[in-house]
Image (cartoon, rainbow, N blue to C red):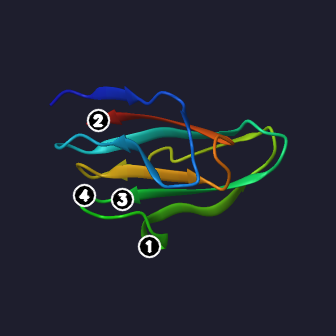
Amino acid sequence: MESAVKITAAKALTSAFQVVLVSYPVGMFRVDIVHLSNVTPAAHTVQVCYVPSGGVPAVGNAVLWDFNVPANDFIEFGEGDYLTPLTTIWALASVDDSINMRVAGTQE
């Protein structure tokens, strides 16, 4: 399989977990960047999980758990992380529509 770049549209996170990205059913997915942007004048927390196929988001598969994103600021992480086939990235924010999330990576 040839490499394929996958970039998600910016997604406004809610206070309930939601799927942000699903890796393809074959090959490894290399995360190039996960970008979280706080679009409000107050700090908010996020939870981000890399969930294997058939799993659910929980502390055990968390990449960030109750991580503080400062007001009107952003964080980036994940460069070089590898996801197995059909792994999903789930995320939530402490306040609806306070954090936007975007993921970019390469399916190998």
State if disc 1 and disc 3 touch (CB < 8 Å).
no
Marks 4 and 1 close (CB-CB < 8 Å): no
Q: Quadrant of residue 38?
A: top right
- Earlier along the polypeptide chain: callout 4 or callout 2? 4
The label number, if any, that marks residue 82 in the structure image: none
Residue denoted by label 4 = 53
Please determine whether, in this image, residue 44 is positioned above or below residue 103: below
Q: Amino acid at mark 2?
A: Gln
Q: Nearer the viewer, mark 1 or mark 2?
A: 1
Q: Secondary structure at mark 3?
A: strand
Instruction: State the residue at coordinates (26%, 45%).
Output: 28
Q: What residue lies at 45% left-to-right and 69% top-to-bottom?
A: 58
Q: Real-space Cα distance between discs 4 and 2? A: 16 Å
Kindly state the secondary structure of the residue where label 4 is placed: loop
Q: Residues within 10 Å of mark 4 (few under 14, many from 20)?
A: some
Front one among 4 and 52: 52
How far across and how far down the image is residue 42, in percent? 83, 47
Instruction: Check residue 107 in the rendering and tell me which mark sits there, or answer none.
Output: 2
Please provide percent x and percent y for residue 54. Answer: 24, 61
Residue at image position (50%, 52%) is 91
- Identify which amino acid the numbered label 4 is placed on: Ser
The mark closer to the camera, 3 or 2, is 3
Query: Dot 3 corresponds to which residue?
Result: 51
CA separation in Å, label 1 and label 2: 24 Å
Residue that badge 1 annotates: 60
Q: Residue at x 35, y 26 (%)?
A: 5
